[in-house]
Amino acid sequence: MSPPLEPHDYIGLSAAAAPPTPTSSSSSSSSPAPRLTLRLGLPGSESPDRDRDCCEDVAAALSLGPLPAAPKAAAASAGVSAKRAFPDPAQRPGAAAKASDDKQQASPAAPPAAKAQVVGWPPVRNYRKNTLAASASKSKAPAEEAASGGGGPMYVKVSMDGAPYLRKVDIKMYSSYEDLSMALEKMFSCFITGQSGLHKSSSKDRLTNGSKVDALKDQEYVLTYEDKDADWMLVGDLPWDYFTSICRKLKIMRRSDAVGIAPRTIEQTGEIGAALSFLSH
Amino acid sequence: MGRGGSRAAPAAAAPPWHVLPDEVWEHAFSFLPADSDRGAAAAACRSWLRAERRSRRRLAVANCYAASPQDAVDRFPAVRAVEVKGKPHFADFGLVPPAWGAAAAPWVAAAADGWPLVEEISFKRMVVTDDCLEMIAASFRNFQVLRLVSCEGFSTAGLAAIAAGCRNLRELDLQENEIEDCSIHWLSLFPESFTSLVTLNFSCLEGDVNITVLERLVTRCRNLKTLKLNNAIPLDKLANLLRKAPQIVELGTGRFSADYHPDLFSKLEAAFAGCKSLRRLSGAWDAVPEYLPAFYCVCEGLTSLNLSYATVRGPELIKFISRCKNLQLLWVMDLIEDHGLAVVASSCNKLQELRVFPSAPFDAAEQVSLTERGLVDVSASCPMLESVLYFCRRMTNEALITIAKNRPNFTCFRLCIIEPHTPDYTTHQPLDAGFSAIVESCKGLRRLSVSGLLTDSVFKSIGAHADRLEMLSIAFAGNSDLGLHYILSGCKSLKKLEIRDCPFGDKPLLANAAKLETMRSLWMSTCSLTLGACRQLARKMPRLSVEVMNDPRRGCPLDSLTDESPVETLYVYRTIAGPRSDTPACVQIV
């Protein structure tokens, strides 16, 4: 229960204790609760036209000393020099006192939002919220993978150096590296054709029928993936099924940027050569 | 009495002492440290006004709508460093509608035109587009410092323009912005001849950067003092970068999680051992406890530690912090818990600023043992503590009274009790007594945020005692109009007041309308305001801009709504620029 407030400061304003009423927001449907009437007006303001007697609940008088919680508006006469400059609005939406129970009260009704969570409370910056959510999901993801072997779709982002936007693929849709490479070819061909003019001379004569070694050497791009340790690895080393469980992101990197990716011998990248052959035109 | 030659004229003809050339006054004013001092000097007389404004080099515009960019350029033609802030503070928590405004473009355009010698630009909570960044890169030949804090609207393409165009760039400081990743290798666009970088902070960038390019940049910028990496830079790359920049003073680590490898650990340890000047450390997202000892060699020298994004907990965290005996600033998550803060209290006696952030703010279940105890311990043992931001779930009046007695030197006290209306958990009383003790004891308090169960009487204390208070944040507090009246009729130095979900209505607002012109801004959302009061306020105070927003019925034009219509959000600020013209549909100026 909120303690009855009877401040006796120089303007002698006081408020009566209010019954517990949850504060509502701008909706005007809450019952008018006892409220304070301030008798201060701006200098030079006229008397208000009080078309409604809104002081039936509480009145304050500008006087020194304790005030009765007299409900009548007639208290306006008590030696007030400043006049009210404004009429009270008819339905005052919940200027109610808050109930103060020892238990935590349910948060006051936020603007007509259906969800229980109050907007913007507690005051945690959006940036912080997003960052925490991202790191929480990252730490959950490995657990999820371990749990759900062949569960739902596994969407990973695919980026390509120089492309203005990224794509997403569900790697569980594919059964092998070749499948994946064909799909990526379809997705990113529009970016590749733009570049093909530059590389025709070097790689055109060395298409897939040529040795795989040559195909690899001359292609402009390598396909890499990010694993759960956030390391960028060359695609193709692992068995396909295992690969799908640990792959987080895919990136079609320019060869020149792929410095530092674990180097592999050519034989081991046999599958890769076939998979990435489309990139070499 | 000259001998030979001319004699001095009689004293009456000599100019009075105060009529000195402007250059003399300009030189005198250059010793005034604070803008407010310069402002006061400028108000003394016309000649001082002229001298001051023509020599002003640094300009801070705390509200981008308080004056037009052209006003600023006309009044202060010699500005070299400008800082502009846009959206109200509650925009950080999603309370400001999207597309509200605060576009940086008009400021950049005016600066490009009127301040071609500008060297520093800072924007906070504004919408900065790639076009703005391109214009900055193209317009200021000696541009050196770009600082963007909590901004949005730009992408790595804009950063590329800055990298390519700003030959003399010293600082590129991106703090908590929303940056769209266009996969453009903006870092590569710093030319090979570019070596002037002192600060590089791209910690908020989500995408990858080319590590090789970064290493080359760091290697050739021998004056690099601040390097804050983003989450995409893995641990082993961090070690390489540190070896190339051992002179570094401030470091923001990249991703700090990896499976433990002894090799990587030794590599890191050795790299840190080489950083003898390291004083400020941040980052460490998902910090893995096993790697924390790699930092031990720098702990002694650290003055600032920001682990507020590090979800590490347990003894390793506490051991690590306890070795940082010279810490002045500590930001952590509540995972440190009370017993961790007790260790901080005994180890870090030079602490000046403490911030404790919630690890699970939206999860009602109490998982973390962080209570009022931690704050009491720190306030008891750290005599220089003056700034606190503390999120917790319970508090008592007694604790607050103890804290107030221990630390009368607080300048900033922000307590956020996560659940609204939480009373003192031992007595079930409102926390009025506790917060009253704070404002009565801390005479120098400039910033205060209150929370928990509070009645009007705490606002009476605040109004009466908080003479130096400049910014006050109130949420879910108070019983009646009296609360707001106490604040607005007291608090002599109040500049910014932000209120949400309190039962404050029209009367105190209108009764104290004149006060609003002495303040920078007032925000009131989900209170008990009506449109009629806002209209009256706007009529009475033509130099205030009265904005209403977020109302559910805002489909219809403002004029057709009655005075009784409720107002969901009110934002009032003083301005010499008149009503702005860039409001979105959900915002209207009364």
Image: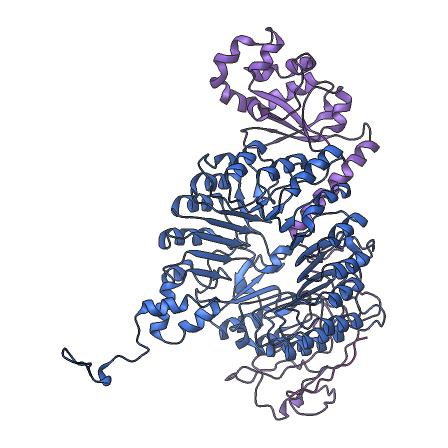
Chain colours: A purple, B blue
Q: Nearer the viewer, residue B467 or B28?
A: B28
Quadrant where the N terminus of chain B sits is bottom left
Residue A148 vs B350, above or below: the answer is above
Could you tell me residue A82's position as x and y percent? Answer: 57, 87
Residue pictured at 71% horizontal, 25% vertical: A171
Residue A84 vs B40, above or below: the answer is below
Residue lying furthest left: B4
Tell me which corner region of the image, top left, top right, bottom left or bottom right, holds residue B26: bottom left
Q: Nearer the viewer, residue A264 or B290?
A: B290
Instruction: Say if the magenta span includes residue B145.
Output: no
Q: For this view, does A196 lie left or right of residue B462? A: left
Count of numbered circles in the view: 0
Q: Does the image show residue A32?
A: no
Residue pictured at 48% horizontal, 43% vertical: B130
Residue pictured at 21% horizontal, 85% vertical: B10
Residue A36 vs B266, above or below: the answer is below
Residue pictured at 49% horizontal, 17% vertical: A199
Q: Characterize the magenta stretch by its predominant secondary structure.
A: loop
Q: Nearer the viewer, residue A270 or B193?
A: B193
Q: Which residues are magenta?
A: A1-10
Could you tell me residue B206's position as x and y percent? Answer: 62, 40
Residue B542 vs B245, above or below: the answer is below
Could you tell me residue A16's position as x and y percent? Answer: 75, 82
